[in-house]
Image (spheres, grey):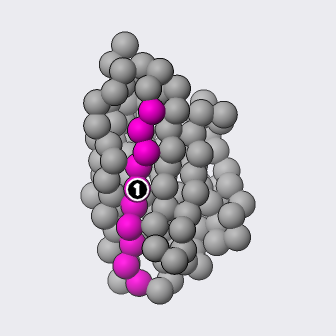
Amino acid sequence: QVQLVESGGGLVQAGGSLRLSCVGSGSIFRIMVLGWYRQAPGKQRELVAAISSRGTTNYEDSVKGRFTISRDNAKNTVYLQMNSLKPEDTAVYYCNVGGTLGGTVGAYWGQGTQVTVSS
């Protein structure tokens, strides 16, 4: 069983930055694909970014060049650095473990953290 705890969400003005963190338990965390997903009101959950155990990354088109996913296996932590935030980035962001780089979700989810970008 993998437990995930997210942090770092909040309210920010357009153009600002936030860094999300997700700390996981369990030794499998470091060998799994880690992903960040988001869900805006009235919309389906979508992949934002994913990173493999070797550091290969994949990004949703609208965040390329603005968001960076990274991982620290020694700390069982995955990060999402979000720069140049836009109001359309407003959503609940979820950490996911065990999926694929292409967006097939894994079995484990965090509780979600709210990101609100004001215009």
Of residues 40 and 10, the one nearer the viewer is 10
Of helix, strand and loop, which one carries label 1? strand
Q: Position of residue 31 (x, y in %)?
A: 59, 79
Q: Is residue 22 magenta?
A: yes
**In the rendered image of this protein, does residue 92 appear above or below residue 105?**
above
In-image side of 89 versus 113 (left or right): right
Give the quadrant of residue 73: bottom right
Question: What residue sits right under mark 1 in the picture?
Answer: 21
Give the quadrant of residue 119: top left
Amino acid type, residue under disc 1 in the picture: Ser
Q: Position of residue 96 (x, y in %)?
A: 45, 62
Q: Position of residue 9 (x, y in %)?
A: 32, 43
Of residues 21 and 56, the one nearer the viewer is 21
Q: Outermost residue, top direction?
A: 119
In-image side of 6 versus 103 (left or right): left
Q: Residues within 10 Å of mark 1 (few under 14, many from 20)?
A: many
Q: Quadrant of the N terminus?
A: bottom left
**In the rendered image of this protein, does residue 104 appear above or below residue 31?**
above
**Residue 54 appearing in the image:** yes
Q: In this picture, which residue range is highlighted in magenta?
A: 17-26
At x 44%, y 26%, the residue is 16
Dominant SS in magenta: strand
Give the quadrant of residue 118: top left
At x 47%, y 86%, the residue is 27
At x 68%, y 64%, the residue is 55
Q: Position of residue 84 (x, y in %)?
A: 52, 26
At x 41%, y 84%, the residue is 26
Of residues 3 and 107, the one nearer the viewer is 3
**Residue 105 appearing in the image:** no
Q: Is residue 89 magenta?
A: no
